[in-house]
Image: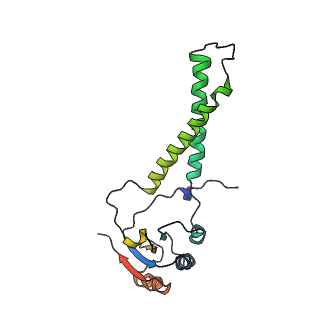
Amino acid sequence: MYWFKKEQFHKFEEMTSGVLGVFDTESSIMDAAKKTKEKNYEGFDCLLPYPIHGIDEVMGTARSGLPWVTFFMGIVGCIMGFGFQYLTHAHDWPLNIGGKALNAWFAYIPITFEMTVFCAGIYTFVAFCYLAGIPKLNRKVVHPDLTSHKFGLWIPSSAKGFKQDEVVNFVKSLGATQVEVVKEN
């Protein structure tokens, strides 16, 4: 059974210092990610211009926790939508219209559905922005081609066993077309 774990809600860490390898193809970044995972570098990331199917499994990344936020906030929205209508019609302002019961729950379904979708959507977006660390206006661009047609492998200096010369040689051995050492400003 799929159950939520703390590591699913990891917060984005800024790329301040480490080694960046730039790759040209999807298959090369997939192979590089697999070999980096086998080398036990923790906290590495793949920077991609578009989603690549299977990269999360290769990297060993935990499944996102955002579906749990969506689910629980959808339940909250459902309870709020139904509860507001029930309390308004049955307790706060009971009007007998056409002989219907004061708790005509089937009439509450459209608003309950809308509140479920609204709360789930809004709070998922808020949680995504929080976990991704956005908005941040002064974020540094690591390599300009990573947003259009190149793929990047980022190994931070905080990774276990990080030694700059070894990591640079390792990334070059993976077939990177460019290797850059990024240092904190």
Is 118 located above or below residue 124 in the figure? Answer: above
Considering depth in this image, is 172 or 157 the residue closer to the camera?
172
Q: Residue at x 57, y 26 (%)?
A: 84
The quadrant where residue 35 appears: bottom right
Q: Could you say where residue 59 lies in the image, as x and y percent from the top left?
A: 56, 71
The quadrant where residue 86 appears: top right
Q: Coloured how?
A: rainbow
Is 71 located above or below residue 35 in the figure? Answer: above
Q: Residue at x 59, y 22 (%)?
A: 87
Query: Which quadrant of the figure contains the N terminus?
Result: bottom right
Q: Residue at x 39, y 67 (%)?
A: 15
Q: Could you say where residue 140 lies in the image, as x and y percent from the top left?
A: 34, 65
The boundaries of the magenta stretch are 9-15
- Asked whether residue 153 is drawn in magenta, I would say no
Query: Which quadrant of the figure contains the C terminus?
Result: bottom left
Residue 143 seen in the figure: no
Is 141 located above or below residue 178 in the figure? Answer: above
